[in-house]
Image (cartoon, rainbow, N blue to C red):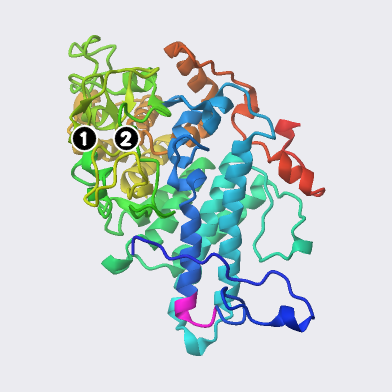
Amino acid sequence: MKKLIYILSILVLASCSEDYLERGSLTQLSENNFWQNEKDALLGINGIYDALQDRVLYGGNLNNIAGIPQHDGFADNAFNNYKFEGPGNFVEGRADPAFSYFSSFWNSLYRGIARANIAIENINNIPEANITPQSKAALIGQAKFLRALFYFNLAVHYEDAPLITEFQTLEEAYVGKNSYEELRAFIISELKSAAEALPASYPADQFGYATKGAALSLLARFELYNKNYGEVIRLTSEIMGLGYQLHPDYAQLFTEAGEQSKEVVFSVRFFQDQSANGETFSSTFLGIPRVNMQPMPNLIDSYLCIDGLPITQSPLYKPAARKENRDPRLGASVYFQGDIFLIHLNRAFQGNTATRFGQKKYIRNNVSASGIGPDQPGGQDFYVIRYADVLLMRAEALAESGQLTEVYTLLDQLRTRAKMPTVTKVNGTALTKEKLIELVRLERRVELAFEGLRFFDVKRWGEVQKAYDRVKADKIGPYNPVYRGRQSEVFAIPQSEIDANSKLEQNPVWN
């Protein structure tokens, strides 16, 4: 189901001996009347999925704290025009441990972890008469996958953080942080356990629940981050046998029409209405394309021409018409001056943003069938993992390992889908390891632009400073990136958490 049902209160957090406090609540679910059967367990699992919809996580935002769909703004793909949302102030060096973005992101991740911990503990205790062993294992597998996804985001962004795996009472809540290596071991263990328990697919009406492929793919992404290339190769080989396919139309994929494509490995699902189940990462203004995240000129320049050559080499490149003769993924991802960005109003983009470009990928361009406008909460699913990324993870791991032959085939699949000439045709099959890695990284950038992965990529490649230099070279008037070493690569543990918990110590990067 697209609209996830969730529970606002599922446990009584404290108890007293007075009779009037021991009376059952008439309005809330409690330990005594919930977690009794498989239906309760599914409701509890849906509550964890609901946490993914937070604006600071995958729901995205406009005019408020940025979500993961806007994480390209932490690097060189996008200019965060509304700097207070988080990425802009971070890149310009105005973040400190009291920075509100750090606490919003941290709190949302731990909210999801807490729900997962509660679900795992209580589903384990449901009597066998009320749930089949297979259903119990699969539901716990989903909770473990989701818990690992929350911890993945903590590990990548904060590195050191408390590892909490059980429901905590107030007295147990004051804990110290764990090291990145401890988080790493836990995430890997969780995802392996989840992959063993989860099915390869679900009936159509249950599309969106975590699958075996989702667990394996997130594990491959994390192992790539940790440069465990042999494991990435092994995992992606298994994923490639699960039936995923590239969607034939790149532009359509990032609309509601593409949401159930065989390319989608795991998505956060949204329902277009006025409730909390709608997202705002696809919303736009009526007078101008969404301006809080604007494509950077250096990103535009990275797309090849239709002859497969960079703009510095291709005779087809026209500086005065930068969209012409370019990789079709550029036109599917970016609005250029003169492009119609609202079909129902026949409204053209005037190029009146700081970068002169507008984001098109994932952004709505019309009213919905129910009459909800493009400036209201929408129903576009966000793809956390798709098959194109799996192919690119495999290509990178193979190239980094010096196993070059298959890399051409993997890149050629993506180029062919994009209606671009293949690497084999343009560059031949005798490239050096370094050149092939360069092409893999370029393909990741243009294929995955505006999907929240650019910071993840440049950080693990050790290229955050280079990304800042590219932004500086773009000379966007109101933007002044300040590279501060590791403070530009690691989020601070929120000062509010340090103040509230004497056992919690700040990451040394921020001391």
Where is residue 138? Give x, y as percent: 45, 71
- In the figure, 117 relative to 497: above or below? below
Q: Amino acid at mark 2?
A: Glu
The foreground one among 357 and 249 is: 357
Percent across and percent down for residue 452 are: 43, 38
Marks 2 and 1 close (CB-CB < 8 Å): yes
Report the Cα–Cα distance between label 2 and label 1: 9 Å
Q: Residue 100, percent across and down? A: 62, 37
Residue at image x 19%, y 36%?
344
Residue where numbered disc 2 is placed: 447
Q: Nearer the viewer, residue 405 or 470?
A: 470
- Residue 84 vs residue 411, the one in the foreground: 84
Tell me if residue 38 is in the magenta stretch: yes
Residue drawn 48% across the image and 67% down it:
45
Q: Residue furthest bottom?
A: 129
Q: Residue 281 — which label?
A: none
**Whether residue 259 is visible:** yes
Residue bounds of the magenta highlight: 35-40
Q: Which residue is mark 1?
A: 418
- Amino acid tagged 1: Ala
Q: Identify the residue shown where x is 29% and y is 69%.
A: 203
